[in-house]
Amino acid sequence: MIDTIKWTGHSVRIIDQTQLPNKLIYLDCRKVETLWGAIKTLKVRGAPALGIAAAYGVVLGIRDYQGTDTAAFVRRVCELCDYIGGSRPTAVNLFNALAQMRGLVLYNPDKTVAILKAVLEAEANAIYEEDRAVCRAMGQYGAGLIHSRDTVMTICNAGALATADYGTALGVMYAAKAAGKKFKVYSLETRPLLQGARLTAWELQKNKIDVTLICDNMAATVMRDKGVDIIFTGADRIASNGDTANKIGTYMLAVLAKYHKVPFYVVAPKTTFDLKIKSGKDIPIEERSAEEVTSFGFRRTAPEGIKVFNPSFDVTPHELISGIITEYGIIQKPFAASIKRVLAQQV
Amino acid sequence: MIDTIKWTGHSVRIIDQTQLPNKLIYLDCRKVETLWGAIKTLKVRGAPALGIAAAYGVVLGIRDYQGTDTAAFVRRVCELCDYIGGSRPTAVNLFNALAQMRGLVLYNPDKTVAILKAVLEAEANAIYEEDRAVCRAMGQYGAGLIHSRDTVMTICNAGALATADYGTALGVMYAAKAAGKKFKVYSLETRPLLQGARLTAWELQKNKIDVTLICDNMAATVMRDKGVDIIFTGADRIASNGDTANKIGTYMLAVLAKYHKVPFYVVAPKTTFDLKIKSGKDIPIEERSAEEVTSFGFRRTAPEGIKVFNPSFDVTPHELISGIITEYGIIQKPFAASIKRVLAQQV
């Protein structure tokens, strides 16, 4: 698999995903500000990858810290976490990773700055390594749902480019392929930023999975006329009742899936769950700039001054979800109880 | 209203819609081949406008006809009709207009070439004038469905740019506005060619209707979170049971409307009905080139060699349609019987 994000020992090396599929460019972020900008502008994206990026952002931010006063260092780490948390609001993995980093220093006020720095770097590495293991586990659990000759559908990019390994929704497909299954995939292009066209189509093609690109508004027709057996999507935040925030268009896809009786699965690790919130109503939805919709490259595609509504995510209510594939197995309905049971059992 | 298409006496003057919204450029087609190319490349588009363009295409093709033998002239007109009919397959208005033109010469074998030429030009002008009257009538019937403070949704462009006057779906909005109603409109951008962003947003903004542009995959979220009161779309061909072919994404919108309990109306003149066919299964669906989906301007947005499915239209089954607004009134369910009754009454 490609290295979407990696700690080099002195920088966070990421693929600049805004350049794909035309150019595969690696970007070394040596300062936390550079990484912050890369998160903001979607050079690195995908909920699990954002968790990893946030953790390494803290490491970058403390690398040149010269003081020896632990209390001051703890304040600095907390400031850094607040700063990184201000980059993007929806993916909870980012906040979960920052909470882990912040917790480490807050609960170890007796340690020296040098030790805390080492511990923080080790923690970021652990978050990275854990994501790799988690991807493989989700892949294994989900792969059983794909059968040979199936037609699969997905939106946005929940693949290697969204994680440290082979992804969430696409990880399931990679695991099914590794198990010798032959199937085809329809990738929704995912307006406005075309992650499905630029990233998912690129990834699946590179990994020799039979993929066909469609516009988002063709999904209903493909479900009816071509037959779709199963849909997999990633998630940016899952509430304790199973309501799932994911890329805009996911809710549309879930409604269409229900109408066409296509099973609709969310694939997400524990770090994507936000058990503090009861339902999707409490998930903040990032709205991005009008230009993402009104221009393409430097070419204007809508009249000047036009009003635009550009939510980057939507919330799919749990009623429309068939199951949630996690590293601990597939969570079934009723979600509120199952999520509590499955995740509470885990450390 | 803007002049989308107009006969100047020696050319068919059209707006080059591929240049909108950046440039308002009029194009004079002096030869039928030029007009054929303009239809093929969507410089002129929209089912009613295509009917008018097809009729004037015949006029262009016979302008320089020098012979005096009526039989030869009739053959020439039939050849021209076949040629023009090969430009785009889905909108039936184009074929209906050509059938009218062809019928004129076939049923008048006793007329001189000079007379037939004059009659054909008069017929094309009549098709043009009729479309204007028809737009107004549909607008009046449909306007009653819009109330002040309503939120309306539409896809693609079924407006002035699709007709000789103020459109079908958008005509209803123009009529409602003229009646003093205040409402807002969500325009789906309509991938891949962005007719909603480039044309509908431009038209409605120009006519001072409150319009907000969204990506197609946001329609479900807008219906649920913003509240949509009614949806209007145009049509490219309506079968005798009410099944309606229209721009890709219309079927998606109809399914989402059903789920969110939003009334879904099709606005189309008699010329859009194809009573020879029983259901939507018999409507040929144009598939266009992969490049429409994989590139933007000259910029590649999907990997080289990727497979693409790019149907330009989809069929919305009549069950999902609340009513069909025609120049004779609103056709209600059951459609097969109502369509027969309403259209049979008319000449």
Image (cartoon, coloured by chain):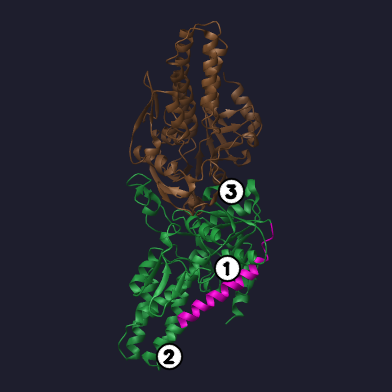
Chain colours: A green, B brown
Image point 33% across, 72% down: which residue?
Answer: A33
Image location (x, y in percent) of residue A336: 60, 70
Q: Is residue B82 left or right of residue A176?
A: left
Q: Which amino acid, by three-letter code, is at mark 1? A: Asn
Q: Earlier in the sequence, mark 1 or mark 2?
A: 2
- Quadrant of the drawing holding the N terminus of chain B: top left
Q: What's the mark number on residue A108?
A: 2
Residue A6 sits above or below residue B130 on the image: below
Q: Quadrant of residue A186?
A: bottom right
Q: Secondary structure at mark 1?
A: loop
Q: Quadrant of residue A264?
A: bottom right
Marks 3 and 1: in contact by CB < 8 Å? no
Which of the two discs, 1 and 2, sits closer to the camera?
2
Image location (x, y in percent) of residue A204: 55, 60
Query: Relative to the observer, which residue lies in front, A284 or A146?
Result: A146
Which of the two discs, 1 and 3, sits closer to the camera?
3
Residue B291 sits above or below residue B100 on the image: below
Q: Which residue is mark 3?
A: A220
Q: Which residue is mark 1?
A: A241
Marks 2 and 3: in contact by CB < 8 Å? no
Q: Earlier in the sequence, mark 3 or mark 2?
A: 2
Q: Which amino acid, by three-letter code, is at mark 2? A: Asn
Q: Which amino acid, by three-letter code, is at mark 3? A: Ala
Image point 38% across, 65% down: which residue?
Answer: A40
